[in-house]
Image (cartoon, grey):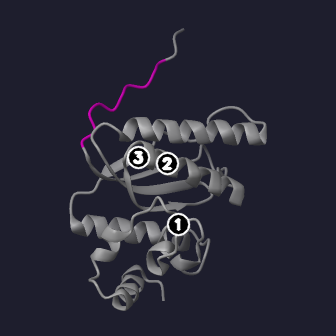
Amino acid sequence: CRAMSRHGRGHIAAGTYHVTTRSAGPMPIFTDDVEYGHFCALVERYVTRKKWTCLSFCVMSTHYHLLVEVPANTLQGGMQVINWSYARWFNARHGRTGHLFGERYYSGRIESDGHMLSALRYIARNPVSAGMCERPSDWRWSSYRSTIEKDKSFPFVDSTLFRGYFGSDPQRIVAQIRQFVGDG
């Protein structure tokens, strides 16, 4: 009996994509700050290596979200390496084997400014919706707090586009983003 291999996704055009994946089952894939930090370091390495622009991200206990702008045909290889590298490291750390992620990553192309803003808000609010914190700015493992506070915790994230939707006055930008995201 021969194992069936997955077919490639084919050509993936340059563009902006909302990328996410979940754990295999209801198990956490991020259990402490070391694991969250290791995953963020992997994302940073591949954002730089693949010449992606990371516009937003959120890492939670059972899944993650990335909003990335990518050159043509780089998303597949980058996501394969990020997920494989993290799963291998996590499994070694916990003395386990087998799949860590349930299915292939999902990638949805962002088609308009409205779609972009919806994705940015959805990613920022995800930990609140999951009951992990009260406000989006409370969640440490997201780019949202860096976007509103201009903090450099995640230097691989470029929040210029997100902030640009809300004008040029720095004080008004933060208030408008907070209102738009529902971080009050």
Residue 104 shows in the view: no
- Would residue 34 be found to the left or right of residue 51 on screen? right
Which residue occupies 34% across, 76% down?
163
Q: Position of residue 183 (x, y in %)?
A: 47, 84
Residue 62 visible from this viewpoint: yes
Crowding around mark 3 (Cα neighbors within 10 Å: few <14, some 14 to 19, many 20+) is: few
The overriding secondary structure of the stretch rendered in magenta is loop
Q: Where does label 2 land, which residue?
A: 21
> Please, what is the three-letter code of the amino acid marked with disc 2?
Thr
Image: 4 above or below 104: above
**Circle 1 residue:** 142
Q: Amino acid at mark 3?
A: Tyr
Which image quarter holds the N terminus?
Answer: top right
Front-most of 144 and 47? 47
Q: Position of residue 170 (x, y in %)?
A: 36, 86
Contact between labelled residues 3 and 2, with CB atoms less than 8 Å apart = yes
In primary-sequence order, the first of circles 3 and 1 is: 3
Q: Is residue 88 left or right of residue 48?
A: right
Q: Secondary structure at mark 1?
A: loop
Residue occupying image coordinates x 55% and y 69%: 127
What segment carries the magenta color?
4-13
- Decide which of tag 1 and tag 2 comes sooner along the chain: 2
Q: Quadrant of residue 179?
A: bottom left
Which numbered disc, 1 or 2, marks the residue closer to the eye?
1
Q: Is residue 77 above or below residue 2?
A: below
